Amino acid sequence: MEFRYLPMTDEDKQEMLRTIGVESTEALFSDVPEKVRFHGELNIKKPTNEPALLKELADLSRQNVSLKSHVSFLGAGVYDHYIPSIVDHVISRSEFYTAYTPYQPEISQGELQAIFEFQTMICELTGMDVANSSMYDGPTALAEAANLSASQTKRKKIIVADTVHPESRQVIASYAKGPGLEIVEIGHKEGMVDVEALQAEIDDNTAGVIVQYPNFLGQIEPLAELQQLLEKEKAMFIVSSNPLALGYLTPPAAFGADIVVGDTQVFGIPTQFGGPHCGYFATTKKLMRKVPGRLVGQTTDEDGRRGFVLTLQAREQHIRRDKATSNICSNQALNALASSVAMSSLGKQGIKKMAWLNMQKARYLRQRLKEQGVESVLRGPFFNELVVDIKMPVAEMNERLLNKGFIGGYDLAKTYPEFATHMLVAVTENRSKDEIDAFAKEMGDIHG
């Protein structure tokens, strides 16, 4: 079947060649050396019609395992949370999903206000003074925080707890290569940062210390104790935090954090194969002018009416490039809007209850697994993830769980050699009692 508006007919090709004054396709590529040209036919299927192609793709998609076909206990940074139905209704409105850069405030008030509300809610959750309009994802925001601390303190060492998400640590290491920062990783004790090792490493060249709260292993790091260590050397305190957990836990600002970052995937953003996400970046007024990305401010017009504008933009792609602390010049406005709608729909009490359900259901799973002979190995306070020793390769356990309709947890041996045969299991408010009971029973039966 030919389509009038797919410009790949022979007539189209000939017309284009005539227009540019070339006799053939081969002549078009005559400047490419013969030895590097591809000869023969590509090993791909012949083109087909639209109905046949849609059927083939649908057949392929049915081979996928998804959250609709299986019950997930996998977290490790991407979580299966409740998304209010209103989220998709709002973000599907054309004035939002086609908006990108609201440089003209006179025609962008809706988009600018949506971003402003996102910033406001992030400040309320973290306890910080100011938040930006979002970043690409949590790891990007964390790496930007590391660079900002080095710029602010004029120091070169960044200390990172190895209980920070391993992918975030990789992004930090990549970012550090440009400015030549030294990245030092600190090990853990009982699933939390080794405070003694951290204390020994902090010196007058330390720009910032990075921890995660709750950390990658699900544990609640002792932020108050860590903050006291940093005060002596005046190193900056950077906390990567799950914003849902902050609906229940004491916010990092209460422990003297200088920068708080994280990922708002937990609010209104589907798992969708790991992205796209939405990072947030919150800090103090002192650092406001060094915040990467965009800031939306509230103001009044000449008639005294409330309005919103991009503000404090003398950085990045603008007039002070030589003094920029970041080259980030974009944001995740659509995903930030999704998170804003989700947070608004849930409300303060709803977010607190949602966080509480995550905590309670994770503890219920820990108890049920213990009854099945599968022990959790960490004893500290935790949020909604726990580490269990299954006494067998995690890949083997997960394959058998998959056959029973479950997506198992994260294989910690991938990033923590000391945790061979250990699985990181996540429980969210979406998991029912029956699902938790069935999952625990299956793990117990496989574990033996």
Image: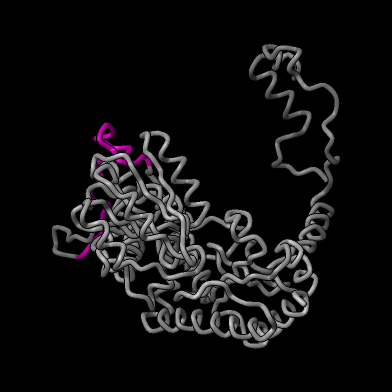
Find residue 386 and report its image quarter. bottom right
Q: Residue at x 59, y 67 (%)?
A: 424
**Rendered location of residue 176, percent (x, y):** 40, 39
Left or right, 358 with reference to 113: right
Question: On screen, 136 above or below 195?
Answer: above
Front in this rendered view, residue 20 or 75: 75
For image coordinates 38% across by 72% down, the residue present is: 246
Q: Which residues are magenta?
A: 306-327
> Residue 13: horizontal and vertical position, in percent?
73, 26
In magenta stretch: residue 60: no
In terms of depth relative to the viewer, which is nearer, 247 or 329? 247
Residue drawn at 29 percent across, 68 percent down: 224
| 291 up-or-down from 347: above or below | above
Q: How is the image coloured?
A: one colour
Name the image quarter holding the C terminus: bottom right
Can residue 348 be seen in the rendering of this structure? yes
Residue 114 higher or lower than 148, as above or below = below
Residue 293 makes an appearance in the image: no
x then y, percent, for residue 84:
51, 76
